Every structure is written in structure tokens, then in C-alpha cells.
Image (spheres, grey):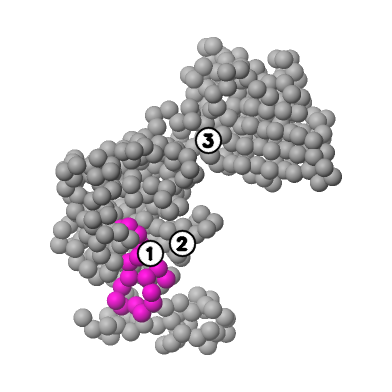
Amino acid sequence: MAKEKTVFTCNACGGSSPKWLGKCPHCEAWNTLLESRAPSEGAGKNRFAALSHTAELKTLSDIEASDVERTPTGHEELDRVLGGGIVEGAVVLIGGDPGIGKSTLLLQALDSLQRAGQRSLYVTGEESGAQVALRARRLGLLGSQVQVLAEIQLEKILATLEAQRPDVAVIDSIQTVYSEQLTSAPGSVAQVRECAAHLTRAAKASGTAIVLVGHVTKEGALAGPRVLEHMVDTVLYFEGDTHSQFRLVRAIKNRFGAVNEIGVFAMTEKGLKGVSNPSAIFLSQHAEPVPGSCVMVTLEGTRPLLVEIQALVDSGGPSPRRLSVGLDRDRLAMLLAILHRHAGVACMDQDVFVNAVGGVRISEPAADLAVMLAITSSLRGKPLPKGFIAFGELGLAGEVRPAPRGQERLKEAAKLGFTVAVVPKANAPRKPIEGMVIHAVERVDDAMQVVRSLD
């Protein structure tokens, strides 16, 4: 096959150049030229005509909408973040730190799908076939019939997909794949974007569900062009500390399900296993209540989780430290200001450390009330009552704002044996919850008075 020419296109003005230049000859912007494939002669201006067939114009009411069929992967937690299972022709991008378990989980899922009658293909660009077989043996996947292809050339991968027609294929990883039509090295922006585009078109045309494994930067974001995340149907992130046995898989984007849904896994000798009760790993095992600890109910997608918030307030120097792990540091400074102004509790000469137990990251403001109560508990040196939970957002005027789906949060806490709750007044249930005493508060000082009355 004849090698096609490449062209360099400016990100700023859209102009093109036959060779790379430091400065765009059209708009004179620096470092904006990116390599791409030039269209072949006679191909016309539309390189992506094969992406979809020409469709007639219809009104929205005339289009028949049908639910997509999903194929369970055999791993309940993975199915949860995918929205119920693998969808035919879907493209999934999964990223995470090296060694966190991406390849392990996907190999386990492919084996389960293959045993359920799905044709599976594992394309490895970072390991040899022998290394993949060794991992399968460690995971106990004896007699697995998953097909393995050790290849990084895009054209050969596409030919294999066309010949084998698998139901599910994994490309591990997209940064190792390259196309002969481009002169840049594998992993470059042009190669990643072009290879992902071709694989996406192949998935839509053939109905093969393709999972792309992506590298991440040192900040934890997916490496390569941001357009890669827009191109795929689902984006999953692996989270967790490699030194801990627990892993979280979070859905950042999902065209077939809810976003911010999480799946919780435990790393064992036989691979990743789903955790049926994830709230247990985010709660410490104190025999008796201790100062500086408050449990809250957070929402991760559609799942309510109980997470312990720990705070330590200690005497500081002239420049006290404010440190939070798993929570927004800037929001911690705001909560300390609200606590001082509206509850009369001053921490300006104290070091304040806040931690979300279990390595979970909490981004919703419903954690505000639990953080504030944990800080005051540590400052006073008095623990909160046993079986105590709290949630709610704090406003700068001192009000306690409601959290979404408060009823579900309270029911989840009651199911796990919690008996006392401090919640926003708007989240107070109309009917009492059996075995739970609920204190509804409107302002920060009201919450402080309730806690003092429980001492």
C-alpha cells in the first residue's frame, strides 16, 4: 500500500503547511501545528464518509427510540459503572496509574465474557503473548479461550478485527498503537488521535465493543489529546493507592448510563474482586467513639456510601497549616471561616488536618456539615455519639442547605445501624425512620447546640 502524505494543521486558525514549522505561516501562532494524514487524491474533502450512512431528515417524534442491549461482564461492580454491561459497538476508554490493575480487570472480564459465549480478543502492545498467558495463570484463568494478539500496527489490528469479528476487543494500550500513514512516533498526539478515530469507526461499523486502555499523566489525567475523551462513548478512571488493596473505578462519561458511578474492587491473589458492601472500607473500626470523627453519607452516582471524616486540630505556630486529603482544601478554609463567624469557634491559631478514610475523594458540598462537626469534636476533645451521622451543605450566611436525595442517604445509614442523624431541615423525612432519631437544623449554630445536647 502506498504511503500517504502528511500535512501539518494549525490548531489556532485551521491553516495547513506541508512541513512542520515552529510558527504558523497563516496566523503566526507558535507551536500550533499538528501532524495529520493528508486526504488521498480523488477521495474528496470528507475523509470520514464511511463513518455513517446517509440518512433522511426526520422529526424527533418520528424517530423510534429503543433501549440498547447490554451484555454483563460477569463482574457486578464493573457492570455498575458501565451502566449494566457492555453495549454492542460501544467504545470505552479506561485510564489509571501504572500497576493499579487495568489489564488485570480487563483480562478477567474478557475471560468471563468468553465463557458466556462472547467472542473476545485481547490486543497487547506493551506485553508479549507469553506475559499475558503468565498473568492469566496467576489469576487462575485456566483453559481460557480468549484470543490474544501482540501487535501495535493499526492496519494489522484493523485487519484482524475485520477477519475475526469479535464481540469484545481490548486494545492495551492506545498509546502503543501507530499507523504507517503517519511519520510521528507511537504515543504522539497525532498517532493517538488518528488510531483512536479509526478504531472508533471500526467499532461502529462492525458492532464490536472496543475497550481502549489509556496512559495517564503525572497529574492523573488521561494522556494525549482531550478529543480522545470526546470521541469515545464511556470514560472510566481507576482510582486508589497502589499500596492499598482497594480500587475504585469511576465513570467520568457514559453515553449509556449514569456518570460518577463507582465500582469498588479489592485486589487479591486471584485478581480484582468486587466489594459487596463498600461502606465498610470507608468506616474505621473504633471500639468506642473517638474525638474528631464524624460519619457522613455521600452519593457516588446512584449509590449512597457511608464515609468517615476524620479531623485533627492541634496548636499551631504563627502560620497554622490547613491540610485536607480527599476533600477540597479551599473549601476547608471556607468552612473554618463559617465556623468562626456563625458558631463562635475560632481555629485561627490551630493546625487543622482533615481526612476522608479509605482513600475516597469527596467532591460534593454535602460533606460540609460532617467536616465542621469533626473539627469541633477534635477541638473540644469530645467524641460524637455512637451511631451518629451528619450531612448537609453550609452557606456563607451560616445556613444549612439540603443535600440531594436525602431520604436515600438516611435509609442507607439506618440499614447499617446508625441511630442519630443531624441533617438539613429540608431533608427531614415526613415519616419517621424506624430506629433513628433525626435532628433537623437550619443554621450552623443549631447544629452545634444539638451536638452539645447529645454530650
Mark 3 / mark 2, whichever is N-terminal: 2
Position of the N terminus by quadrant = bottom left
| Amino acid on which the number 3 mark rests in the picture | Gly
Residue bearing the label numbered 3: 358
- The residue positioned 25% from the left and 50% from the top of the image is 134
Marks 3 and 2 sit apart, C-alpha to C-alpha, by 26 Å
Residue bearing the label numbered 2: 223
Looking at the image, do the residues carrying marks 2 and 1 touch, with CB atoms under 8 Å apart? yes
Q: Nearer the viewer, residue 309 or 403?
A: 309
Position of the C terminus by quadrant = top right
| Amino acid on which the number 2 mark rests in the picture | Ala
Marks 2 and 1 sit apart, C-alpha to C-alpha, by 9 Å
**Is residue 375 shown above or below 214?**
above
Q: Which x, y percent locates residue 322?
A: 72, 43
**Residue 175's disc number:** 1
Q: Secondary structure at mark 3?
A: helix
Q: Residue furthest top?
A: 435
Say whether residue 92 is magenta. no
Tell me the magenta residue range: 171-188
Mark 1 / mark 3, whichever is N-terminal: 1
Looking at the image, do the residues carrying marks 1 and 3 touch, with CB atoms under 8 Å apart? no
Check disc 3: other Cα within 10 Å, few if <14, some if 14-19, many if 20+: many
